[in-house]
Image (cartoon, rainbow, N blue to C red):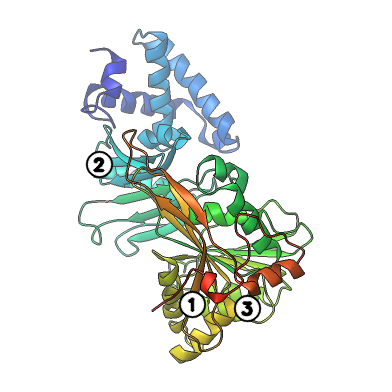
Amino acid sequence: MSLRARITSPEEQGGRGEDGHMVASYRAKLLEEIDLAEMSALAAAERRARLERVLGHIISREGPVLSTAERAQLIRRVVDEALGLGILEPLLEDASITEIMVNGPDSIFVERAGRVEQLPIRFASNDQLMQTIERIVSTVNRRVDETNPMVDARLPSGERVNVIIPPLSLTGPILTIRRFPRSFTLHELIGFGSLDEPMLYLLAGLVQAKFNVIVSGATGTGKTTLLNALSGLIPETERIITIEDSAELQLQQSHVIRLESRPPNVEGNGRITIRDLVRNSLRMRPDRIVVGEVRGGESLDMLQAMSTGHDGSLATVHANSAEDALMRLQTLASMSDVEIPFVALHDQINSAVDVIIQLTRFADGARRVTEIALLDSHGGEPYRLATIARFNARPMAADGRIHGVFEYHPLPRRTADRLYMASQPIPQAFGVARTLDELTTREAR
């Protein structure tokens, strides 16, 4: 069997077998011949190039005799082991992969185009996987061990990393790396089928007229991607403050302040929460506040900011429907250390939230806006949602894709008047409801 076949074989991959010993041997020889102090002064690309040159000389001097392709692959594997993340390096360089899921040393899954697949590769052992994990978390000055068995962090290159190890994990060390694609515009999202032109023009008007928008959806539905695209509609002249657990938003405006929460240090001190940042942002003269995700007591502070002069704010929340998003916001706000009756929280949400955009990830991997709903209730009234756009999906077709059509409904008069006062046109596909009977409304529980 050729070296290339051995390296790429599922049974041998990750350092098992003869090629694994060869990789380990050349890695040791490489480390003997380089000056670590000199290497640390080089940029990452220069460091890799230097290692590849030195290793090439070692292979030429000591053998074995390899074809050009086999030689390049051996050099790549040795340098990845010495410098990078071993078998994960090619996955991180593959632009089509959006998520890497390592479920112990023998089970590696990735997500491509919305679909999850298992790869025929593996780590040589638990120890090798733990070494890779420790290398990853050390880049953000964190550590993982039995006393600190969970880490959630953002890498300098932008990926979000989550680690959980035994004794909390019963299947060995678990590593999840979420990669974020470049930011997309709403026009590009139309090309993906996530929404259509009438919806784009409506959303543009709502954002520029300073409606408070909540983007709702389950995990992996594209909430951050849509939030980033919507934020591109905010006028260049406004001061924007973004608040996130792990910085993912990539706003292009010139006057953007990016804030990121901080976990506690190894002694358990120094934690800065999303709620702390939301409170502080109110003292920073924001025109807009963009919260990557509300998931706790900061929901109350966000709602209060929305209803007390900080119009045009944007946030995401985990929920499976527009109705669930309202209930979720109410529950999260109740988790605040300020004891507020549910009735008061209900009033606060009616006052603060204007628009809910619901996202869904379908069985074919496509992510779409499945509903745009306006909160058309006031004060102590029951939540009343007016659906103004919806995606009607059809059963999966023979090509494995889910097709459907977007449908539109008239806007409430109050919404139309607000858009008019902000000099924002109403897309012809929607129109304006003349009577309450024309509205597609429903009460949330």
Nearer the observer, 418 or 218: 418
Quarter location, residue 6: top left
Rendered position, 227 above or below 41: below
**Earlier sequence position, callout 1 versus callout 2:** 2
Dividing the image into 4 quarters, which one contains the C terminus?
bottom left
Quarter location, residue 287: bottom right
Task: Give how far across and how far down residue 129 sits, in percent.
Answer: 31, 43
| Residue drawn at (51%, 41%) of the image | 192
**Earlier sequence position, callout 3 versus callout 1:** 3
Q: CA distance from mark 1 to mark 2?
A: 47 Å
> Disc 2 designates what residue?
107
Circle 3 Cα neighbour tier, 10 Å, few/some/many (<14 / 14–19 / ≥20): many
Nearer the observer, 265 or 429: 429
Taking the image as shown, residue 311 lies to the left or right of residue 398, namely: right
Task: Give how far across and how far down residue 442 sits, in percent.
Answer: 44, 74
**Earlier sequence position, callout 2 versus callout 3:** 2
Mark closer to the observer (2, 3): 3
Residue 305 — which label? 3
| Element assignment for label 3 | helix
> Disc 1 designates what residue?
384
Rendered position, 382 above or below 429: below
Circle 2 Cα neighbour tier, 10 Å, few/some/many (<14 / 14–19 / ≥20): some
Dividing the image into 4 quarters, which one contains the N terminus?
top left
Is residue 7 among what the camera can see? yes
